[in-house]
Image (cartoon, coloured by chain):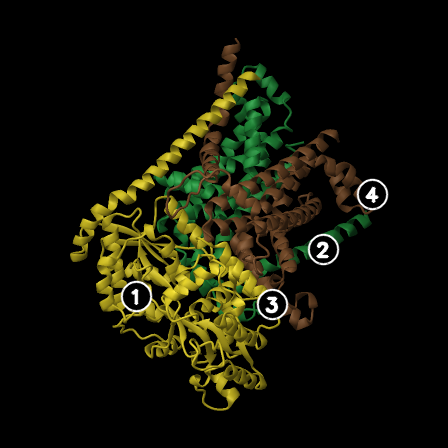
């Protein structure tokens, strides 16, 4: 009896999990293990030859002050991006849960930025920040926009956040809307329209009921903003003077431009560990919240 | 519970074993191919160069880092295919900037290298083991090209890449604006020193025009401007390479180095009269080039390649030229009357995964490209580039490269080939330091220190 | 009631105002797709002197649009189909069978979503290149399946957890097999998740540049994003045809989104997930 149960379970496992796990293993797990192996070698595409060097590459990573600084820069960037994108998406979604005719266009509108890919999007914002806004700023004397935001480290930092959050908002909004389907319609209406007591409704009813959606959204926005590369490349190119290089951008530069593939790859592994720990911890904590509430 | 643990362990083990197997397989095949092929290829290329076979269909690929002329190359491939129906050439366009190398390396790593690569000379040197040695064709190209063109393309003495374009850079000038400011004809030879330049800038400023435009991108500042410092040391590439080695070993103090200090003194001057003074790092290449061409700035630190933008512009001025960047007040100092000149891109042929037939077809195509009427016409008039070849019938409209050619024909050029031997990230890293200097984030001492530190971190590489 | 209507009007006017600001960059693309690149560089805000549809014709020809469109379509449709089917099944497996192994695998998938693609890039092309599996659409689709499964499983997992087991239990007692229960009872309930994932995965795959650029090497395999890169040069961008090309690339997914949006709303109002 027990044995046949095992075989039936194995059959179910292979049927339901087989194809996706095979693809996952062949495309993600195996290349990752190869990549991990390469961080312990001095592999170089120019020679295609390598020998094992132990932890030398990792030692370099922790001696690379630039990388550590950029990791910190990335953390700050991620924090604000996640915060802004989620807050905006949550409230936009809250306003758009009735599914009326007008809302259809609003939803589409907010989702539109997702229709374009990262590099092109970055170029668009680059033009906006370095040409359009200074043009307006100089014409109407707005001091905030007189200079390009991309030529100063601080403003370029915010430019990166705005561009990323802009795209994320519509994406997250959709998940929040789907998540709100678990919240009774009249509660949603009350929270969206009523002035008094509105925030109490949101805090006591809507928020706890949408914890699953929040978990998903925070997780997605965390991992997506940690791994931002395209927008960084097109918007600031790491400039001014390499001060806005996000971690992934730095890694690509290191591995491919500076010809230090092993170190770049090791940095990527370190980044992966950081992101995985943060993302999984927050999911765990939020889930606990869900259970308790 | 226990059972599942065991299974999990087994799965992990299988995955790891599979990985190792795949990995070792990958290595062996990429190691074998280069060693197995040269012997065959030596025999085959010998035949091929005598009589290009026209029966067997060959497919070759072309990796292009001059992305702005992708379309021109694609048209050329079509033309060539019509003339030689058995040869099909596919373009591998590249993404922007640093991502080009990412793509190039991924092609190599996957064992699918492009047959022909149009690359920076420095990149070819970095990957020299992957490319075909063109020694057997060297004599032929020496015949075809202008004197010195093949020598300038040699990398560590080897002929790995075929030169096809030559570019020069310096201070471009908009003739109309300069002449309106000085109220008469402008003789470019009248600017021999930094003081001459400053006097001219003052006049232009008094006439209400911006004297000069600095393009604030790292490649312009790091590779082209600061790059001059390595080339201006002496007239010899070998000596200049030694200078860079000394930098790496910490034997040079830039603050005591006359060419560096002179160059940076001139940079201070350019900075003072910079049209983009308000926001120097915006660095929009289209806009900067267009503004210069329309007369919003009299001078522009750039090269003749900017014709790709300027040439097609509506409402631009007609007459442009180039003068050297003066680095001192002694007219006889090296660099004050010479233009920086180089063959920045070379065509190299892959030798790591291409078949002898492909290599032969690649050679035949490249020769056609640089010698045929269609090829020359495309390079000279459509791309707006100048070719270092003797018999070029096509006539381009690029007046800036004509101006560069005048310097070169008089032997007044700076050979900047030392940059071919620099690490590939030098322009990005030192360019960032130049950007800091441009916006006064660091002073001269800070700049020298950052640049020296960059070189020291490359010691022994 | 009256104050309610007023509040509602206020809310919507505010939302629309916010939307217009939000979409300014997008409106700029549309406007500038009718101008010449030079006019765009001179003043990105100026109204086009006349509407030049020439950019669209240029982009269409330059990108070999129809060809790229077909390639993108084949790849996107097959990849999204496979991702949805297999990840919903695996999501179900992970929810309903609380084995240790499943928990470990689920954790691995979650963690993999934090993986920078650059870690995998070189090993991936090394392994598949040496096995001669590059330059095939099917390889690319397989890779999308591998990369898309974690997020799919993650999303389905989250929603299947909320589906009461009682529905299945009775069917199970009646002797239905697992696959039958899944396809007949569970799958229909997942419709809203399907729609959401279709939109998200289509967008990702339709717009993806890096992976196809590594896998599809020959020009006749090019997808639309790869073709768009014809307009990028080393130092600058040829904006006008790029923008026209972009709009043409975006329209199919926009239509899809508009079409599916109805389904999302329907799914939500049906309360399938309550």
Q: Secondary structure at mark 1?
A: helix
- The location of residue C248, given as percent across then percent down, is 48, 55
Which chain hosts label 4?
A
Q: Secondary structure at mark 4?
A: loop
Q: Which mark is residue B443?
A: 3
The outermost residue toward the bottom is B184
Q: Is residue A14 left or right of residue B369?
A: right
Which chain hosts label 1?
B
Residue at 75% over, 42% down? A189
Q: Which residue is mark 4?
A: A197
Mark 2 crowdedness (10 Å alpha carbons): few <14, some 14-19, many ≥20: few
**B141 or C272, which lies in front?**
B141
Q: Is residue C248 left or right of residue B107?
A: right
Chain A takes which shade in the image?
brown
Residues under labels 1 and 3: Cα distance? Answer: 39 Å
- The location of residue C273, given as percent across then percent down, is 64, 32
Quarter of image, res B73: bottom left
Q: Secondary structure at mark 2?
A: helix
Quarter of image, res B448: bottom right
Q: Is residue C108 left or right of residue B370?
A: right
Nearer the observer: mark 4 or 3; the answer is 3
Q: Which residue is mark 1?
A: B151
Residue C70 seen by the camera: no
Q: Which residue is mark 2?
A: C13
């Amino acid at each position: 009896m027990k044995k046949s149960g095992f075989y039936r379970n194995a059959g179910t496992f292979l049927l339901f999990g087989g194809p996706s796990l095979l693809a996952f293993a062949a495309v993600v797990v195996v290349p990752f293990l190869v990549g991990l192996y390469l961080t312990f070698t001095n592999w170089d595409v120019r020679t295609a030859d390598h020998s094992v060097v132990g932890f030398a590459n990792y030692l370099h990573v922790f001696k690379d002050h630039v990388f550590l600084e950029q990791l910190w820069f990335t953390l700050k960037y991620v924090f604000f991006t996640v915060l802004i994108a989620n807050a905006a998406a949550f409230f936009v979604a809250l306003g758009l849960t009735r599914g009326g005719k007008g809302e259809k266009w609003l939803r589409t509108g907010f989702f539109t930025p997702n229709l374009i890919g990262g590099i092109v999007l970055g170029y668009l914002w680059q033009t906006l920040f370095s040409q359009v806004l200074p043009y307006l700023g100089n014409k109407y004397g707005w001091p905030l926009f007189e200079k390009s935001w991309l030529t100063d480290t601080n403003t370029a930092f915010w430019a990166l956040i705005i561009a990323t959050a802009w795209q994320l908002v519509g994406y997250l909004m959709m998940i929040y809307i789907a998540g709100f389907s678990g919240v009774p319609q009249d509660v949603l209406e009350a929270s969206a329209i009523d002035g008094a007591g509105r925030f109490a409704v949101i805090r006591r009813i809507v928020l706890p009921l949408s914890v699953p959606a929040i978990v998903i959204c925070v997780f997605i926005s965390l991992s997506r903003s940690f791994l931002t590369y395209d927008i960084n490349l097109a918007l600031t190119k790491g400039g001014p003077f390499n001060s806005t290089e996000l971690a992934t951008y730095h890694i690509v530069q290191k591995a491919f431009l500076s010809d230090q593939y092993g170190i770049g790859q090791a940095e990527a592994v370190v980044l992966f560990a950081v992101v995985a720990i943060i993302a999984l911890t927050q999911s765990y904590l939020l889930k606990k919240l869900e259970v308790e509430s | 519970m226990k059972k599942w643990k065991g299974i999990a362990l087994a799965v992990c083990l299988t995955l790891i074993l599979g990985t190792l197997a795949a990995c070792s397989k990958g290595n062996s095949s990429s190691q074998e191919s280069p060693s197995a092929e040269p012997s065959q290829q030596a025999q085959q290329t010998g035949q091929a160069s005598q009589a290009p076979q026209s029966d067997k269909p060959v497919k070759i690929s072309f990796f292009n880092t001059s992305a702005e002329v992708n379309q021109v190359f694609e048209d050329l491939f079509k033309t060539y295919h019509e003339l030689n129906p058995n040869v099909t050439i596919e373009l591998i366009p590249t993404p922007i900037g640093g991502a080009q190398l990412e793509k190039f390396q991924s092609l190599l790593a996957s064992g699918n290298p492009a047959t022909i690569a149009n690359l920076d000379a420095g990149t070819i040197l970095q990957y020299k083991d992957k490319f075909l040695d063109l020694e057997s064709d060297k004599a032929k190209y020496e015949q075809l090209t202008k004197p010195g063109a093949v020598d300038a393309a040699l990398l560590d003495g080897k002929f790995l890449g075929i030169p096809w374009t030559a570019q020069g850079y310096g201070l471009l000038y908009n003739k109309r604006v300069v002449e309106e400011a000085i109220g008469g004809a402008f003789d470019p030879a009248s600017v021999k020193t930094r003081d001459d330049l400053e006097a001219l800038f003052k006049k232009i400023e008094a006439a209400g025009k911006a004297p000069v435009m600095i393009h604030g991108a790292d490649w312009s500042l790091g590779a082209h401007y600061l790059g001059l410092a390595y080339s201006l040391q002496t007239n010899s590439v070998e000596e200049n390479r030694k200078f860079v080695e000394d930098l790496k070993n910490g034997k040079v103090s830039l603050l005591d180095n006359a060419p560096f200090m002179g160059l940076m003194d001139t940079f201070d001057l350019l900075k003072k009269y910079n049209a983009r003074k308000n926001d120097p790092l915006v660095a929009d290449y289209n806009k900067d080039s267009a503004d210069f061409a329309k007369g919003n700035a009299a001078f522009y630190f750039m090269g003749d390649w900017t014709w790709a933008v300027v040439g097609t512009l509506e409402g631009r001025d007609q007459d442009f030229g180039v003068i050297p960047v003066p680095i001192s007040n002694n007219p006889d100092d090296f660099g004050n009357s010479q233009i920086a000149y180089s063959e920045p891109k070379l065509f190299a042929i892959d030798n790591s995964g291409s078949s002898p037939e492909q290599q032969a077809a690649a050679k035949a195509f490249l020769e056609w490209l640089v010698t045929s009427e269609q090829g020359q016409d495309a390079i000279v008039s459509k791309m707006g580039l100048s070719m270092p070849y003797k018999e070029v019938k096509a006539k381009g409209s690029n007046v800036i490269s004509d101006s560069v050619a005048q310097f070169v024909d008089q032997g007044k050029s700076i050979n900047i080939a030392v940059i071919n031997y620099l690490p590939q990230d030098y322009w990005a890293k030192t360019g960032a330091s130049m950007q800091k200097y441009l916006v006064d984030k660091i002073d001269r001492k800070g700049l020298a220190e950052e640049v020296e530190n960059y070189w020291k971190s490359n010691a022994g590489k | 009631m009256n104050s309610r209507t007023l509040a509602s009007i206020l809310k919507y006017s505010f939302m629309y105002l916010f939307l217009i600001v939000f979409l300014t960059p997008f409106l700029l693309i549309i406007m500038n797709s009718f101008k010449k690149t030079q006019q765009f560089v001179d003043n990105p805000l100026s109204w086009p002197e006349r509407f030049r549809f020439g950019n669209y014709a240029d982009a269409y020809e330059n990108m070999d649009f129809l060809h790229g469109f077909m390639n993108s379509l084949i790849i996107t449709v097959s990849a999204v189909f496979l991702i949805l089917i297999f990840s919903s099944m695996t999501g179900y497996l992970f929810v309903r069978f609380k084995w240790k192994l499943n928990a470990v695998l689920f954790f691995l998938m979650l963690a993999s979503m934090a993986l920078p693609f650059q870690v995998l890039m070189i090993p991936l092309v090394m392994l598949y290149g040496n096995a001669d599996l590059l330059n095939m659409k099917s390889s690319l689709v397989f890779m999308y399946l591998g990369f898309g499964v974690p997020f799919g499983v993650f999303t389905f997992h989250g929603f299947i957890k909320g589906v009461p087991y009682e529905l299945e239990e009775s069917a199970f007692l009646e002797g239905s097999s697992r696959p039958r229960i899944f396809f007949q009872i569970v799958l229909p309930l997942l419709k809203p998740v399907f729609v959401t994932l279709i939109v998200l995965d289509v967008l990702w795959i339709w717009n993806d540049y890096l992976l196809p650029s590594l896998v599809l090497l020959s020009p006749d395999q090019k997808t639309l994003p790869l073709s768009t890169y014809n307009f990028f040069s080393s130092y600058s961008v040829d904006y006008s045809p790029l923008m026209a090309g972009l709009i043409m690339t975006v329209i199919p997914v926009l239509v899809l989104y508009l079409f599916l949006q109805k389904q999302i709303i329907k799914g939500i109002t049906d309360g399938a997930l309550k």
